[in-house]
Amino acid sequence: MKAKFIKAVEGGDLVSVRLFISYELMLDPRGKSFSEMKNFAETKFSNLYDIDDAKSYSSVKTEWNEDFLFSIKNDLDRNFSKEKLAIYEEVAKYVLKDKAEQLNKEEASRSSSVNAGRVQKNNKKKLYIGITVGGAAVAVTGLCLSRIALASLGFAGVVIGGILLYNDAKK
């Protein structure tokens, strides 16, 4: 939840809290953050909801569009009832389903790029370990065969691999 919303709830600003809740579905029609905000406000306000004015709305989904959604939103601003909020939530999720799908795709993309970064970091670490271990094997082989050039090359691999591992660990 956003800090401004929490501050409005804690400050007892009923009008702002109601606006925050209703606008949240426009921002994120998936409804998770909306539900969290609504539940939080319900625990803090005994007078969060008005008595419903019993205005009826079309239940034919083919008639639901953005104009209809905004009409309900305007009515909700004047009469913030549980019933009207439930209708508004249902219509918003239906009318703004493309936006919800886009938000899901963006979230999945961000998540996969974070995972790709982790995989890339693990692959680098494996490479650096391979250089270090390989260098050690070459150094030992060079010492066993009394080949100073081979041993020197192996020690260089150990040093380079160690430096790469150290720098990677500092990031």
Image (cartoon, grey):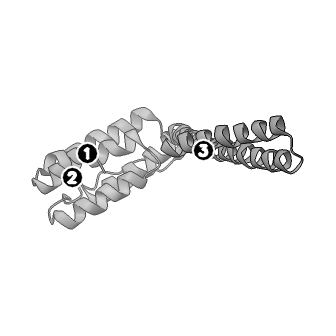
**Amino acid type for the residue under numbered disc 1:** Phe
| Residue hosting label 3 | 165
Q: Dot 3 surroundings within 10 Å: few (below 14), some, or many (20 or more)?
A: some
**Amino acid type for the residue under numbered disc 2:** Ile
Report whether 66 appears left or right of 98.
Answer: left
CA separation in Å, label 2 and label 1: 10 Å
Above or below residue 4? Residue 46 is: below
Instruction: Give the camera-side residue of 1 and 53.
Output: 1
Q: Residue at x 42, y 43 (%)?
A: 28
- Which of the two labelled residues, at mark 1 and mark 3, occupies the earlier sequence position? 1
| Residue hosting label 1 | 20
Report whether 47 appears left or right of 67.
Answer: left
- Which of the two labelled residues, at mark 2 and mark 1, occupies the earlier sequence position? 2
Above or below residue 94? Residue 149 is: above
Q: Residue at x 75, y 48 (%)?
A: 136
Q: Dot 2 surroundings within 10 Å: few (below 14), some, or many (20 or more)?
A: some
Residue 6 badge:
2
Asked whether the viewer can see residue 79, the reply is: no
**Amino acid type for the residue under numbered disc 3:** Leu
Res. 12 image quadrant? bottom left
- SS type, badge 3: helix
Instruction: Give the camera-side residue of 92 and 127.
Output: 127
Report x, y in % for residue 97.
Answer: 53, 42
Q: Dot 1 surroundings within 10 Å: few (below 14), some, or many (20 or more)?
A: some
The answer to the question of whether label 2 and label 3 lie on touching residues, with beta carbons closer than 8 A, is no
Question: Mark 1 or mark 3: which is in front?
Answer: 3
